[in-house]
Image: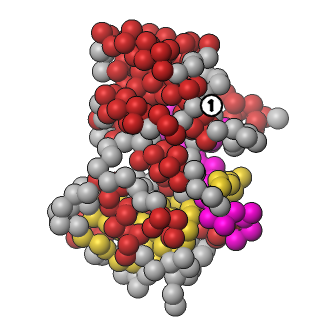
Amino acid sequence: MSPLVSVIIPTRNRPLLAARAVKSGLQQTLKEIEVIVVIDGVDEATHQELSKIDDPRFQIVQLSASLGGGGARNAGVDRSKGEWIAFLDDDDEWLPKKLEKQLAAAKASQYSCPIISCYLTARTPKGEFKYPRRFPRSEEHLSEYLLARNSFSFGEGLIQTSTIFTKKELLQQVQFKAGLAKHQDWDWLLRVNTLAGVGIEFVPEPLTIWYCWEKRPTTSTISNWKNSLTWIRNNRHLVTPRAYAAFVMIQAGAQAAYQREWQEFLPLLKEAINNGKPKAIDFWLYLAMWLVPRDTRRTIRGLFSRKKTQTIKSA
């Protein structure tokens, strides 16, 4: 049976996590699928662990050299046979009905090339959170939805890679950018959103589990803020002035603050003001990034999340 959906999982040096991701893919209620793991470079441990999985719908693609997350996803798309593609990061999981519900939404979409996302559950050491906290507003520019914030809380606008479901032909037309260390999902979304017939829609249910902020190396924790600044400068034509300023202050600024590079406080602020249009909330968030340690911010966020959950349960 030819698969309707091809699941692409790029991985490297995380055999147990990758195996967990594969199993959540194979356990989908939609059975007409294939699950393709792309091992991004030489990684015998991961190959051995995944070879234990016995399912005719599962295959391993072994790359001889690392292409990065974007290049590995492209390699998986090239190997895929499904009309639709769903991406799953190796350290995330799906709920069983994720593909079934996204396929139904895609078939009912008003767009010829829809991108279907969904809510996710962010599972962190400080608590669990449901993201995004809202969907894009009518006529809201995608860059502002993804990159800017209108409140102090994280996750107002979010489309995470493990929630992306779309047509293979769209991914063949616009590939992920190989060699990009960070912001791979944003980069692809902003570029592909300029095409006719493309539109983003959401299944209003949490169908993905996103494991984040754990004590292990990830792209988010090891990337240098200068890479982020270079990325937004190169993509300035795809974002609004507000989104540009917010990204410089909240994304690049937060990374520079975490790395304690105080000498960059004013240069980054000037970059945002001179080349973008920040709002008052951006200035407050920027100060908070520099003055309040990241772990403290996350602890406060976790406390508010638990209090909100307890309030809902007691209501």
Q: Is residue 277 above or below residue 44?
A: above
Q: Residue placed at 60% from the left, 34% from the top?
A: 144
Comparing 98 with 187, the one in front is 187
Comparing 167 with 291, the one in front is 167
Q: Is residue 250 above or below residue 129?
A: above
Amino acid of disc 1? Ser
Comparing 276 with 73, the one in front is 276
Magenta range is: 107-133
| Location of residue 79 in the rendering, given as x and y in whole percent from the top left corner | 37, 76
Number of marks present in the image shown: 1
Q: Residue placed at 23% from the left, 67% from the top?
A: 63
Q: Tell me: 144 left or right of 295.
A: right
Comparing 124 with 175, the one in front is 175
- Judge whether residue 130 is colored magenta: yes
What secondary structure do most residues of the magenta stretch adopt? Answer: strand
| Location of residue 309 in the rendering, given as x and y in whole percent from the top left corner | 68, 35
Is residue 24 visible in the rendered image? The answer is no
| Location of residue 261 in the rendering, given as x and y in whole percent from the top left corner | 29, 15
Q: Residue placed at 46% from the left, 60% from the top?
A: 174
Q: Tell me: 79 left or right of 315.
A: left
Q: Tell me: 174 left or right of 277.
A: left
- The residue pinned by badge 1 equals 305
- Judge whether residue 202 is colored magenta: no
Is residue 280 visible in the rendered image? The answer is yes
For mark 1, does the 10 Å Cα neighbourhood hold few (<14), some (14 to 19), or many (20 or more) residues? some
- The answer to which image quadrant residue 269 occupies is top left
Furthest-right residue in view? 315
Q: Residue placed at 52% from the left, 21% from the top?
A: 276
Picture quarter with the C terminus:
top right
| Location of residue 248 in the rendering, given as x and y in whole percent from the top left corner | 45, 24
- Give the structural element (helix, strand or loop) at label 1: helix
Q: Is residue 17 above or below residue 293?
A: below
